[in-house]
Structure formats: C-alpha cells, structure tokens
C-alpha cells in the first residue's frame, strides 16, 4: 500500500479519518508510556456503551508502510477497560469490504456473543454493524481479536482489562499492558501459500555441516532424526525471516518504553497476541513474580523467565531499581526478538543481550519419552529408515488411536509423556528458574472438585512437511462430529501432541483446570501449551451451554484445520 498524502484540510477536518489512514498507536501504547492511569484519556474504551470501527490502515514498522486492519484507527486496538458485575454493549461497525468479527478471548459470555463465524454467529457482514451485549462476570487481563480469516495477522487485536468488583487481590503501584505480536509485510494468504508449498520455507537455522557443532545434539540423535526424515530445528513455522516482533506495536528499533519510579511494584499485564509466535520472556536483572495467568490469580511464584504461548496472558509484578531494563521477548526458535524498555526516565536504554543459540528438538519432543532410542523401528518413514536398527515403537502405529490415519497424520507419539513440569522447548538448561505449569497453584480453591466421570483423549495431529493440521486426524472443513458434553458434566481431557511443534490450545467459553499435582487448587486456564510429543490432562466442568470453538491458537494451524466444535447441551431453557 502506498503512503496516503494528507493535506491541511484533511488534517483540520477529520482527526478520526487521519488516525484511520495513518494507523497510529493508542495512548497506552505510545512510544513512551507512564502507565495506564495516565493514559485513560485516549485509546481507552469503557462504560456500558462502546463503539468500535474496523477499517483498513496504513501501518508503519520502522518507517516502512504496510497494509493492515485495525480498530478505531490504531494498532494495537484500543484498550477496553470494564468492571466486574457491569453489563456492556459493544457495537462494531465494519468498514471493510469483507466480513469481520471480534472474539472476546477468555471472557465468559453467552455462546452467541462469542464472535466465531460459522459456530456461534454468522459474522459481521461487510459494511454493516453488529452489537455484542453481555454481562461482565470476571476480572483480570484478557484480549480481543478477529476470528475471520487471517485478519488477526494484519493487526486486528487489542487488550481488555476487567477491574474486580471488590478489592484487587494483586497490589501494585503502577501497571503497564504489554501486547506482543508478530508483523509481516508479506500478505498473510501469500505467507500461508508458501507454507503449503515448501516445508520449513522460513527456517534459516537448519543444521548444516558447517554449524552442526553449535548445538548439543549428539551424532546418534542426529542420525536418528535423519533416518526418520525429521528436522530437529523445525520449531517455528514462521520465523524472523518473515517477521518483525512488536511490543505494543513497536519494533525493537522503535523501543517502546514503560516508565516507573524506583521501588514501585509495577504490574505488567502480558498478552501474547501474535499470530504464529511463542515467546520466551525475561527482563535481565529483574525477578518476575507471576501473580495471575489467563486473568485468574495464582499463588505468587518467582521466576527468571517464562514461555508464553499464543493467546495466553500472564500478570507479573516487578520491583525495579533506579535504572533501565530491557524486556526481551525472544521467539521460541531464537531467530529474532521483540525488545522494549522499562526505565525511570524517557530516553534511557539498557543493554540488549544477544540471541541465544537456537535449540534443537529431542527424542522426548518426538513422543519417545525416556525410552532407549537405540532400538527404534523407523519403518514408517520410508526406505531411508530401512537401515536403522529394529525398534519396539512405530512412529505411526495406527493401533494406538481410534480415528482414521490418513496422509494428514505423519506421526503418532509412541510414548507421550506428561510434560506440565517442563519449561518449554529449549529452556531445560538455561541456568535459571523458568516457569512451568506445575508451578501454578490457584489462589482460591476450585469451585468444582468432583472426580471426572470419564476421560477423553484428543490427539493433536498433522503432517508437518505438507503443512496439514488437524485434531484426531480430521480438519474442521471435513465437518467432523463435535466433542459432545452434557451440561455440568465433569470430564478429564487428555490432549496428546502427536507432532513436533508446541500447540497453544484454546477452548472458548470455559476455563479448564490443569491437572498438575495441586488437587483442590488446580490452576485455571483458557489456553494451554501442549509440548511436542507430550500430553497434558485438564479437568473441565462443561457449564456453558452452546457450541464453542476449540482450536490451536497458532493462526495458520487453525486456518489449515486444527479446530473442532465443542457442543454442550441442553441449551438454556431446553429439556435435558
């Protein structure tokens, strides 16, 4: 998109039009921010009647203009600040020539207000309006985004903060919202096509003869990956080769800066709004006190680093001294990073550490747990595997699953492990404390402590080389049978990752509890990372009647089909 010229008449006569054309940042995301209290006058929407306009924008990153879609003329979109217990009506005017939608990520709303076209409502037609209306039943840090096509990649996302009805259990002196995202000048449909055309097209960090000594992979492991025709560096589909990583809409060079006074308890409301990037978060020189995740308070736990999947949120408390700090959001594959600054004065900047060495996958990420890999059977991976020693575990043993295994499933984890105690790919040996899901303990006791009456195994499946993604071997476009639950049924879901990539799985309309060894205080989440070759167990009370989306929050995985419908019946007022 070319630059849009602005003459004097346009400047005087239409501030809103100017913002829509230029793609500005809202006040809370301005290059230098004093925090949310000082930014209430601009870029913040509150009250019981809210209006939003979705339109095309000309968004600049490092001075280069790109085609974008934003809300009320900004990227990120305005901060929506609500109060627990209120009602809200949000009217969305769609100025696009295509349908759009807004999904209120993590908010407990009636299913027909959830904003997923084709599942919970028809979508917002081009050049039309739609009004969402729902009670606000919770508090905490959330966000919103388009659920139409690939609009989220183009900038269609923004934060939500809901203040509690009573005293806030998380004491703080100042708060900043930190919205992480990934920006590309490549049109998202072109990017998707390239992923389909060539596996690993954006991976510029593959092992070669020249660099094979730069990681910890043994020669034996390298031979095993080669025999199976798997790439141990295939960790992120889209990398810094195509992405600039943004913090509050700013590139590392633009350096978003959040101000503080020394000794303050600063609350960072961290939201991963990226389309396709999982980040590793650290602030060198500062401990991170994790106090909430996905909007729900947890017992404070102090860490040095955490991995945040797409669509997860974490609330952190930091107590900085009178100096500048770099906030580092390193991509999971370590091909690039987002960088921002926390400082007592504008203009200060701390040293930025270099990218760490790129990680490689392990046999655990292949679903082989701690087994002896020397006796593996590679027969499922073609002629190249025929020379491998015999193995007791087939990498595509169809007898392990009860669904049809077609060309869209290239792996079934032979020995998946419970990985809630793992920090995430590449973070096992960084030399400091990294958060794991096992560290999380709900601050208040669980409201439903019934023992689940049944367990449902759900396999996250795909063919990485052909960029085919599914759940239980079926894409959403194949119209698979929904996962059905009786209303208020207590169920245990086991999500088994039969691929070599981390999948952030999101269930709409519900919170589930992570089964992590803290019965009675299991942490509640709406999105959870399922590590490669592993599984997680979650307990779910199906207390929200309706049809809900359940999907991987890697945008291109969902677009390719890694999504299903969860159906909870009976509906409100219907007979059981």
Image (cartoon, rainbow, N blue to C red):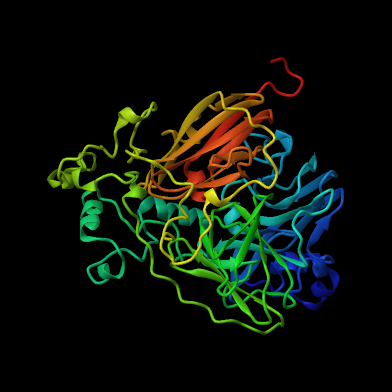
Looking at the image, residue 331 lies above or below residue 525: below
Using the rendered view, name the quadrant where residue 491 is placed: top right
Q: Nearer the viewer, residue 562 or 72?
A: 562
Q: Is residue 48 left or right of residue 80?
A: right
Residue at the image point whose x is 52% and y is 53% from the top: 436
Q: Nearer the viewer, residue 520 or 361?
A: 520
Q: Quadrant of the N terminus?
A: bottom right
Q: Quadrant of the C terminus?
A: top right
Residue at the image point whose x is 25% and y is 50% from the top: 229
Q: Nearer the viewer, residue 487 or 461?
A: 487
**Residue 513 pos. (x, y %):** 60, 39
Q: Is residue 15 visible?
A: no
**Residue 164 pos. (x, y %):** 80, 50
Looking at the image, residue 546 lies above or below residue 71: above
Looking at the image, residue 232 lies above or below residue 495: below
**Residue 385 pos. (x, y %):** 18, 45
Residue at the image point whose x is 46% and y is 55% from the top: 424
Q: Nearer the viewer, residue 165 or 22?
A: 165
Tell which residue pokes out farthest to the top in this image.
575
Q: Is residue 399 left or right of residue 378?
A: right
Tell which residue pokes out farthest to the bottom in this image.
347
Looking at the image, residue 126 lies above or below residue 191: above
**Residue 143 pos. (x, y %):** 68, 52
Q: Is residue 478 visible?
A: yes
């Amino acid at each position: 998109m070319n630059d849009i010229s602005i003459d004097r008449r346009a400047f005087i006569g239409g501030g809103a039009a100017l913002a829509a054309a230029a793609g500005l940042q809202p006040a809370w995301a301005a290059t230098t921010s004093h925090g949310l209290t000082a930014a209430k006058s601009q870029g913040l929407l509150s009250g019981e009647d809210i209006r939003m306009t979705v339109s095309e924008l000309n968004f600049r990153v490092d001075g280069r203009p790109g085609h974008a879609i934003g809300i009320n003329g900004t990227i990120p979109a305005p901060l929506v600040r609500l109060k627990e217990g209120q009602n809200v009506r949000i009217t969305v005017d769609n100025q696009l020539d295509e349908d759009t939608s807004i999904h209120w990520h993590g908010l407990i709303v009636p299913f027909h207000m959830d904003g997923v076209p084709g599942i919970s409502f028809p979508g917002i037609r081009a050049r039309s309006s739609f009004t969402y209306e729902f009670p606000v039943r919770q508090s905490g840090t959330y966000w919103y985004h388009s659920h139409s096509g690939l609009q989220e990649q183009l900038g269609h996302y923004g934060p939500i903060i809901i203040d509690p009805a009573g005293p806030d259990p998380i004491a703080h002196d100042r708060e900043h919202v930190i919205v992480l995202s990934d920006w590309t000048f490549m049109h998202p449909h072109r990017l998707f096509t390239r992923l389909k055309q060539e596996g690993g097209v954006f991976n510029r960090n593959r092992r070669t003869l020249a660099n094979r000594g730069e990681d910890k992979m043994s020669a034996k492991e390298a031979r095993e990956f080669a025999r199976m025709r798997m790439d141990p560096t295939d960790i992120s589909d889209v990398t810094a080769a195509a992405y600039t990583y943004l913090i509050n809409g700013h590139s590392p060079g633009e350096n978003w800066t959040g101000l503080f006074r020394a000794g303050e308890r600063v609350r960072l409301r961290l939201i991963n709004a990226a389309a396709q990037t999982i980040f590793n978060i650290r602030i060198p020189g500062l401990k991170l006190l994790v106090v909430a995740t996905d909007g729900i308070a947890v017992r404070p736990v102090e860490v040095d680093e955490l991995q945040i999947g797409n669509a997860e949120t974490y609330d952190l408390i930091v107590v900085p001294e009178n100096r500048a700090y770099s906030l580092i959001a390193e991509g999971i594959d370590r091909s690039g990073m987002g960088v921002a600054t926390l400082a007592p004065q504008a203009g200060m900047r701390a040293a930025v550490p270099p990218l760490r060495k790129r990680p490689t996958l392990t046999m655990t990420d292949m679903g082989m747990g701690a087994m002896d890999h020397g006796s593996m059977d590679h027969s499922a991976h073609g002629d190249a595997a025929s020379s491998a020693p015999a193995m007791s575990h087939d990498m595509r043993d169809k007898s392990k699953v009860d669904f049809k295994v077609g060309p869209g499933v290239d792996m079934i984890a032979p020995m998946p492990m419970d990985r809630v105690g793992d920090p995430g790919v590449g973070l096992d040996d960084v030399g400091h404390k990294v958060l794991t899901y096992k560290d999380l303990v709900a601050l208040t006791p669980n409201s439903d402590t019934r023992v689940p009456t049944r367990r449902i195994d759900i396999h996250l499946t795909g063919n990485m080389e052909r960029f085919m993604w599914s759940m239980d071997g079926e894409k959403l476009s194949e119209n698979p049978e929904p996962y059905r639950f009786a209303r208020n049924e207590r169920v245990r879901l086991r999500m088994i990752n039969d691929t070599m990539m981390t999948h952030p799985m999101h269930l709409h309309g519900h919170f589930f509890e992570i089964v992590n060894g803290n019965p009675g205080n299991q942490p509640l989440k709406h999105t959870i990372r399922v590590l490669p070759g592993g599984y997680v167990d979650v307990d779910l009370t199906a207390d929200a009647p309706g049809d809900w989306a359940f999907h991987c929050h890697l945008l291109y995985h969902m677009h390719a089909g890694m999504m299903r419908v969860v159906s909870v019946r009976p509906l409100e007022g219907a007979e059981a």
